[in-house]
Amino acid sequence: MKTPILLFLFALLVTSASGSVLSVGNGQVNATSELASMNITLDSAPDGLMDYNLSVTIDDPSIATIKNVAFPPWAITTETSLLPSSFCWLNATTGPGTNITTETTLVTITLEGLSGGTTPVSLAVYSMRDDYSNEINPSIINGAFTVNAPVLPNADFSANMTTGVAPLTVAFTDESTGTAPLTYAWDFEDNGTVDETTKNATHTYLAAGNYTVNLTVTGPGGIDSEVRTDYITVTEPPAAPVAAFSANTTSGVAPLTVAFTDESTGTAPLTYAWDFEDNGTVDETTKNATYTYLAAGNYTVNLTVTGPGGIDSEVRTDYITVTEPPAAPVAAFSANTTTGVAPLTVAFTDESTGTAPLTYAWDFEDNGTVDETTKNATHTYLAAGNYTVNLTVTGPGGIDSEVRTDYITVTEAPVAPVAAFSANTTTGVAPLTVAFTDESTGTAPLTYAWDFEDNGT
């Protein structure tokens, strides 16, 4: 037998006009390593068979292999590919005059069983010529080879999930093959301990980690294991969120802007829902937030945090206190008197308004000097004149001044009268008429009382 050079030719699988059929029978053995022969036959070649170039393939090489081939004695030259193999190329020449009128064996193949099961045996024709060098294009009938031996188990399984948080319950489904009956040994943590022996099984992983799963299947055909390294990944359960926050200020006057800082804990990702007035409205969803309170009042703040571990809220009742903005001061005052002679003592009464506490600066002579800082004040004007009074009031709401120009009028004290007079004559005969001239001094207005005879009248 010559060692062939394989020719990769396309098989022409069409029915010839003569209706020739190339077929391979069925074969079987009752145990592995046993041999059985199968004939490749042609049912007709009325114009003779000069040569043929075929191939035979064992479709499932795990079940059988081709151990040997034998050509009929009328084959002049023969060639095959190397054996044993699941594929064999067959080439023979017969010479003229080999007329085929009944089913005739072109080659006998010997197969060896390797494992239990049935495999198709497939034929292909690359070339087949009659005595006139015309191509014979036979129909092909493929065969089958059966090894009646227990099929070696092939362990296989799947899981309804392979990742999750502890405790993680996983349902394992057996997908093994092999001749029954099969027994099962599940080792869910690959620690050498058989955890379950049912066909399908469920296991709960309590702790975080990567787990290797081992399924060992035993049957009449043998034993097999499927080991899947780090097949199950269990993570720690997420930490439940604990909502917490702080604020840069918790009290102030309106409008009050407050910066809130999230201090929550829990497994990420976390989402946030801020309700700054506890009215059921989500005002902000960022981690940290800023909010402006426009009106006075006590405000409850609610932060709700949601994460893989659940949900939690931090509610701080009356956490933010907002007061009305202080009223701007309006300086005002009155005096118990605004005119008089020097020295003139005036009592000033504050009538200012505005948010307390208020401070006072009295300038009674409008000379830029603060004369008094009490709420109400008294001042004595020593000299005559017109005095402007300035009261400046300062408070949380600002500053204001009340300036009253020439508010206080002080006059000099009146000069005491000094009576004096003269007469145009002081002597003469009766009747004597005398003209008296007043020469008195003193602050006007002056009134006069003349008593010319000093008799009290």
Image: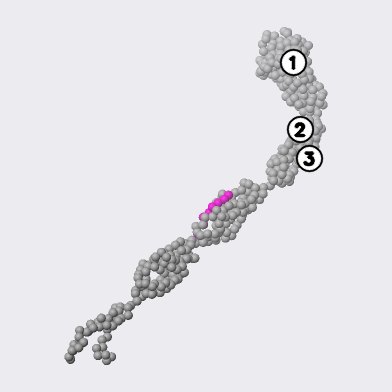
- Secondary structure type for disc 3: loop
Residue visible at 75% across and 10% down in the picture: 77
Place of residue 54 in the rendered image (x, y in percent of width and height, measured from the top left): 71, 16
Name the residue that disc number 2 marks. Answer: 154
Q: Is residue 128 visible?
A: yes
Q: Residue furthest front?
A: 427
- Among the 4 quarters of the image, the one containing residue 86: top right
**Is 323 in front, or is 128?**
323
In the rendered structure, which amino acid carries the disc numbered 1? Thr
Q: Which residues are magenta?
A: 287-296
Q: Nearer the viewer, mark 2 or mark 3?
A: 3
Instruction: Tell me the CA gap for discs 2 and 3.
Output: 22 Å
- Asked which secondary structure carries label 2, the reply is loop
Give me the disc on residue 27. Answer: none
Looking at the image, is 186 positioned above or below residue 325?
Answer: above
Sequence order check, earlier mark of 1 and 3: 1
Q: How dense is the environment of label 2, judged by Cα within 10 Å: few (below 14), some, or many (20 and up)?
A: many
